Image (cartoon, helix red, strand yellow):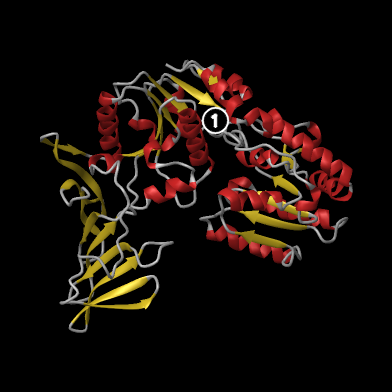
């Protein structure tokens, strides 16, 4: 058994989760049993895994494990049909499609928040006292059972959270206490687990215990995907091998080793080895650690085809992926401005999500200053067929990321036959792309000239599309699986 471990499956997943999920599917398709393992509590976990192309038999969540809910069939809970709301005693009013109020003699005693992306299904229920202070909140699992209840102090902060099995048995409690002026989780208590109670100080300690319990039943190899969870691994004992997959560069832009990796590289965290995406990074990292450094791709393409220019929106540049400061999205705007000097109708679309409101405001201001308001758009985060359509509708993908682990967005675009122009950075584009596709970091004019050439020469564009498709062959399922098998992981 293989365990690929990370924090969560999110509403907006990053390349790390997509890589982990694709590898999970790949291993299982070859009969190599593998689980996508997560630590965090997420009531909609079994919905979000579907966006990653996974099913319930390919995943294992820590809270599901202790809640005896790893294999639960879905039973939709409509708020107006739920037996948890006595209709003879309470009145239900719905001021909007996303909320319903539970009234008793005209007073709001509870509010039902509909589960996002559903129609009238139970999401969570907030309960109020006579002063309209929230006193408790029930969270409903996507599969249709009450999963947890949080209890609140008068100031609105959580004091205690209880977790239930699908039949309502309490199996876990998290106590929140005041630590240096802040309420935070201080005790995780397993209740009557295998006939005994267990207490842990942190969620990571609970996770270590969980993995040891799972490995007693199904021994196997661990591959950790997130540096934030490095400290959970040393306490995991019953395993064949423990590896960390690094999805990014091991250094910052100044060439300094990332502080999150110092203990790992010293060999202090009881890992068997480190895996990176490229041979180039493997060679650079090995002298820095006594641990074996291995190399295997973190990207797998579902299909590989050559696009037709007729399918593309003329002169459209696509920037794909999370919009964040370290990815230098402003460079794409300067490059577009330079492109428009030769191709006046060139446009740019950002496709991805951002949690940085200040950055988005700065980009909006720069768009105004450069006179690009009518030619730059920000599209919604999409996956699956919708993402395929976005990629195949563009004429070129532009990557201005200054540091990479591999560059999943480039490879995904290339597998659709979309030409890519990218910064020439280590551990990514320059390991699988040719010189004519690469430009020096920050050289806006050279990037613009390469894009203009593709826009103005249909024959050159079609040749670039064919080349991109050929380059993506390195990342087909059969090719990637062979490279992983060649690692001979313990």
The residue at which mark 1 appears reads as: 250
Counting from the top left corner in percent of width and height, residue 398 is at 71, 46
Q: Residue at x 17, y 83 (%)?
A: 105
In this rendering, would 2 be left or right of 444? left
Q: In which image quadrant can residue 375 be found?
A: bottom right
Q: Residue at x 38, y 35 (%)?
A: 229
- Which one is in front, 38 or 157? 38
In this rendering, would 140 be left or right of 389? left
Q: Quadrant of the N terminus?
A: top left
Q: Quadrant of the C terminus?
A: top left
Report whether residue 37 is seen.
no
Q: In which image quadrant can residue 128 be found?
A: bottom left
In this rendering, would 143 be left or right of 350? left
Counting from the top left corner in percent of width and height, residue 66 is at 23, 40
Q: Judge whether 463 appears above or below 485 on screen.
A: below
- Which one is in front, 51 or 433? 51
């Amino acid at each position: 058994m293989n365990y690929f471990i990370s924090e969560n499956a999110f509403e907006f997943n990053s390349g790390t989760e997509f890589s982990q999920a694709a590898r999970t599917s790949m291993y299982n398709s070859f009969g190599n049993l593998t689980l996508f393992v997560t630590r965090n509590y997420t009531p909609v976990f079994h919905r979000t895994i579907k966006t990653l192309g996974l099913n319930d038999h390919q995943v294992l969540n820590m809270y599901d494990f202790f809640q005896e809910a790893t294999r639960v069939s879905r039973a939709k809970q409509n708020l107006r049909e739920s037996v948890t709301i006595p209709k003879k005693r309470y009145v239900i009013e719905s001021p909007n499609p996303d909320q319903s109020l539970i009234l008793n003699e005209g007073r709001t005693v509870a509010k039902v928040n509909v589960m996002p992306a559903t129609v009238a299904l139970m999401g969570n229920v907030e309960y109020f006292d006579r002063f309209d202070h929230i006193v408790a909140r029930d969270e409903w699992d996507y599969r249709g059972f009450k999963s947890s209840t949080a209890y609140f102090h008068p100031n609105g902060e959580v004091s205690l959270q209880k977790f239930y099995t699908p039949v309502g048995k309490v199996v876990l409690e998290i106590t929140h206490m005041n630590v240096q002026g802040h309420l935070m989780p201080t005790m995780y208590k397993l209740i009557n687990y295998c006939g005994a109670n267990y207490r842990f100080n942190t969620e990571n300690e609970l996770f270590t215990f969980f993995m040891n319990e799972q490995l007693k039943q199904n021994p196997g190899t661990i591959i950790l995907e997130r540096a934030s969870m490095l400290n959970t691994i040393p306490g995991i004992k019953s395993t064949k091998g423990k590896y960390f997959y690094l999805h990014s560069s091991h250094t910052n832009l100044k060439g300094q080793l990332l502080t999150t990796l110092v203990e790992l590289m010293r060999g202090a965290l009881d890992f068997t080895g480190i895996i990176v995406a490229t041979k180039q990074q493997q060679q650079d990292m090995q002298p820095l650690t006594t641990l074996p450094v291995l190399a295997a791709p973190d990207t797998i393409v579902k299909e590989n085809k050559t696009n037709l220019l007729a399918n593309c929106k003329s002169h459209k540049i696509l920037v794909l992926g999370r919009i964040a400061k370290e990815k230098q999205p402003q460079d794409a705007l300067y490059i577009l401005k330079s492109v428009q000097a030769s191709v006046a109708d060139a446009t740019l679309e950002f496709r991805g999500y951002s949690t940085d409101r200040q950055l988005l405001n700065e980009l909006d201001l720069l768009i105004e200053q450069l006179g690009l308001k009518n030619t730059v758009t920000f599209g919604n985060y999409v996956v699956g067929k919708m993402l395929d359509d976005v990629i195949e509708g563009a004429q070129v993908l532009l990557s201005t990321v200054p540091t990479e682990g591999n560059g999943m967005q480039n490879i995904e675009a290339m597998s659709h036959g979309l030409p890519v122009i990218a910064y020439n950075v280590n551990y990514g584009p320059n390991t699988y792309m040719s010189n004519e596709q690469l430009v020096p970091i920050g050289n806006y004019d050279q990037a613009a000239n390469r894009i203009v050439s593709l826009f103005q020469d249909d024959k050159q564009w079609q040749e670039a599309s064919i080349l991109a498709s050929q380059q993506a062959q390195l990342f087909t399922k059969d090719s990637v699986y062979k490279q992983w098998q060649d690692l001979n992981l313990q």
